[in-house]
Image (tube, grey):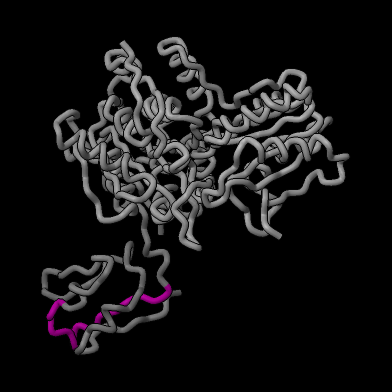
Amino acid sequence: MAKRVGMEVAIAVAEAVGQCNIDMAAVYPITPQSHIGEHLSDLVADGRIDAEFITVESEHSAISAVIGASGTGARVYTATSSQGLMLMHEILPIASAMRLPIVMGIANRAVSGPLNILNDHSDTMPQRDSGWISIFVENGQEAIDMTIQSFKIAEHKDVNLPICVNIDGFQLTHMVESVEFPDQEMVNKFLPPREPFATLHPSKPLTMGAFAMADYFTEIMKAKNEALKNSKKVILAVWEEWARMFGRTYKPVEAYKTDGAETLVLTMGSMGETAEMAIDELRAEGLSVGLVKLRLWRPFPFAEIRDVLKNAKKVLVTDRAVSFGGPGGPVFSEIKSALYNERVRPAIYNYIIGLGGRDVPVTDFVSMIKKVVQDAGENADTYEFLGVRE
Amino acid sequence: MTKKDGPTGWREITTGCVVLRPGSASEYHTGSWRAQRPVWNNSKCIKCGICYVFCPEGCVSQTEDGYFKANMDYCKGCGICAHECWPRAIAMVEEG
């Protein structure tokens, strides 16, 4: 029987990893990820799971250690945040080029400077082009479900790619939520042992991570891009299987009250639930508004985005990171690029919100959406920092 | 010199670019990068082996008569052997 408990989300993520029959984890602690690593280390030390936990000296070592272990065929996990993720940056494209199905939890936190430990998406955005599958969770239940799903997606024979599960730091990691853990036997059925395409073993020598010059490099990059694009089919299939087995449905793009809505707001991560409350309020006032929640960041779900936005007159994209000197936030750029070749396009607005942990209450969503609804079009295609003190 | 043309198409790339045949790197003849080659003057050579020790490619070997030679398939012409050879028995000579 599935078990419902009240639990801090970071602890719940570690418990979920503990349900996945991992062989090895290497985690270096960093706020707000630390509770994931600490609790996972407890699970190993207490003998609740049969796995190696390597206490590494840095995040660079953590990701390198899981690459090595994954190369031997092990099922591996790591987690990090902010500066730790930045330190891993050099190794991330190597993990995806080597097609190693590493699962990594990211407790999203603002990148320095100035030093700030609170939540935004400025840590994960610079990793966008590393060739990893990247998903965002909205609440504790999704953090559990998508952590378990990630092993199955990453290890699928048609995928073999690393995957990062973005969990908003503090807003999610440090909240105590009512969550349900799937039954262990069901998880075992859902997630069979890993079948690696190749393993490092002395009895069968092979080379992983070889050198390649201009004669091979372009073809290797093309193959990697195709692999990442193709992973979407498997992601959709795994989410369908999850819905059948566990009753909770996941889609790359989630629509909330979008039917007939003239103005749509788009969120990624934990702010989706706050935005839902604002939509409910505005709908009650008679405004034609709806919400789109982006769950799959890479591979980017172009078709689903075009489909959900096709009848909207205006779209308000929220971003949790800045692309300095760029056209707006990174999510905004992607949505605009998805719509550019459409014959009929909505007017598009961008708000950069919740930087470095700044609270974005329902009232802020309400006023932001109202401003866009009332705009005659003169402010379309612009971006602004929500609530910035001039 | 071995000419490397690469794959005929990206679909040939193995998952993770894994090289399934051990030792295949030896087929990559890096000697083609060379602009200068080391030439030993055995009348000056004292058979100390310092060229063998310092060669970063490991391509210098000792012959039956105790002198040294480089494998030109892999010698990149870096000149470290000539620099380290204190009896100055090795000269770097332009290729071509």
Above or below, comparing residue A65 to residue A175 in the picture: below
Q: Quadrant of residue A140?
A: top left
Quadrant of the drawing holding the C terminus of chain A:
bottom right
- Residue at 60% x, 30% y is A293
Query: Overall secondary structure of the magenta stretch?
Result: loop
State the image coordinates of residue A120 (x, y, percent, origin top left): 52, 47
Q: Is residue A32 visible?
A: yes
Q: Is residue A166 visible?
A: no
Numbered disc total? 0
- Residue at 29% x, 45% y is A27
Quadrant of the drawing holding the N terminus of chain A:
top left
Q: From the viewer's side, name the closer residue of A150 and B39.
A: A150
Above or below, comparing residue A153 to residue A243 in the picture: below
Residue B38 highlighted magenta (yes or no):
yes
Q: From the viewer's side, name the closer residue of A243 and A176.
A: A176
State the image coordinates of residue A113 (x, y, percent, origin top left): 50, 62
Residue B88 highlighted magenta (yes or no):
no
With B96 as the anchor, is A383 left or right in this view?
Answer: right
Q: Quadrant of residue A308?
A: top right
State the image coordinates of residue A180 (x, y, percent, origin top left): 37, 20
With B84 as the anchor, is B31 left or right in this view?
Answer: right
Q: From the viewer's side, name the closer residue of A340 and A244.
A: A244
- Residue at 28% x, 84% y is B83
Q: From the viewer's side, name the closer residue of A226 and A162.
A: A162
State the image coordinates of residue A20 (x, y, percent, origin top left): 29, 26
Above or below, comparing residue A219 to residue B38 in the picture: above
Range covered by the magenta-colored residues? B35-49
Above or below, comparing residue B70 to residue A151 in the picture: below
With A230 as the anchor, is A97 left or right in this view?
Answer: left
- Residue at 29% x, 36% y is A76
